[in-house]
Image (spheres, rainbow, N blue to C red):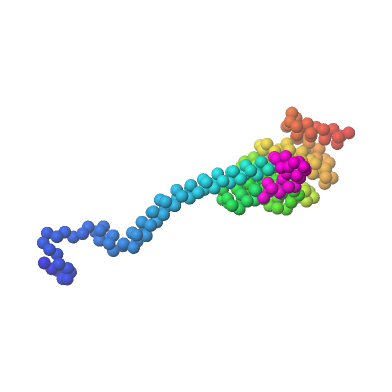
Amino acid sequence: MTSPLHPHMNIEPGEKKAPKWLLWAKSHQEIIFVIGIVVVLIGVGIPYYLHTMEQSEKDAMSALNLGQYYLHAGVDAKNGPFKSETEKDQQALSTFQRITTDFAGTKTAKLARFYMAKCQFQMGQFGPAYTNFDTCTQDLKGTPLGDESYLGKILCLEGQNQLPQAVQLYEAYLTQNNGSFLIPEMRNRLAKAYLATQNKAKAIEQYKLVVSGYADTEWGKEAARQLGLLNS
């Protein structure tokens, strides 16, 4: 029997037409094949990526622990393991730098950058240290190390004798971070910066704030000593 709509198509009695979805599938085989490949890649790729990242974090953390060991290792000119502070700091710095490059994108790499900046600061490399501390203020924002990084930036400026810029950062931090654990230290350091820039009145003001708010802490006691010297 010939179909009146398709004269070349023979339809035997009792023969059923194919379901519409099957006809659609046959006419879109390439699309279905591509979708299938994508599904497979997602099913395999995501677990693989997560496993790879997890392993990278473990490897990065092992390297970070090694770098911290170097930082706290003893220095002995005769027996080692390091014969000078410079040698020790350089070894630690190299380890932390490797983490930031070999394991970029991991959480541990952000921590390694902080310790890298500390090594650079200790070695007098104030420019690179400032840059890395600045990055850490964003990467570690809202954490104690984020605040420590901000202080690190200021100390780098002081190391380069850029006191006016350091004073500006001190003042900005104190304005924006009332509850920070670094407040008494920041105020004491700001007071010293004021004294270095011949602003005794503001220095005294900062020391008084530390004494009134943190009298029982080491920073409060230090501020009281400095006030006694300034008023003598």
Could you say where residue 230 lies in the image, as x and y percent from the top left?
A: 86, 36
Q: Is residue 88 left or right of residue 106?
A: right
Query: In x, y percent, where is residue 163?
Result: 78, 48
Image quadrant holding the C terminus, namely top right
**Residue 9 visible (yes or no):** yes
Q: x, y (%) of residue 138?
A: 62, 48
Tell me which residue sits at (55%, 44%) in the image.
Answer: 58
> Between 203 and 109, which is closer to the camera in this rendering?
109
- The quarter holding residue 25 reads bottom left
Residue found 75% across the figure and 47% down from its top: 86
In the image, the segment drawn in magenta is 72-94
> Can residue 175 be seen in this snapshot?
no
Say whether residue 102 is left or right of residue 91: left
Q: In the rendered view, would you say 133 is above or below 210? A: below
> Outermost residue toward the right?
232
Check the image and report above or below for 2 versus 208: below
Residue at the outermost top position: 216
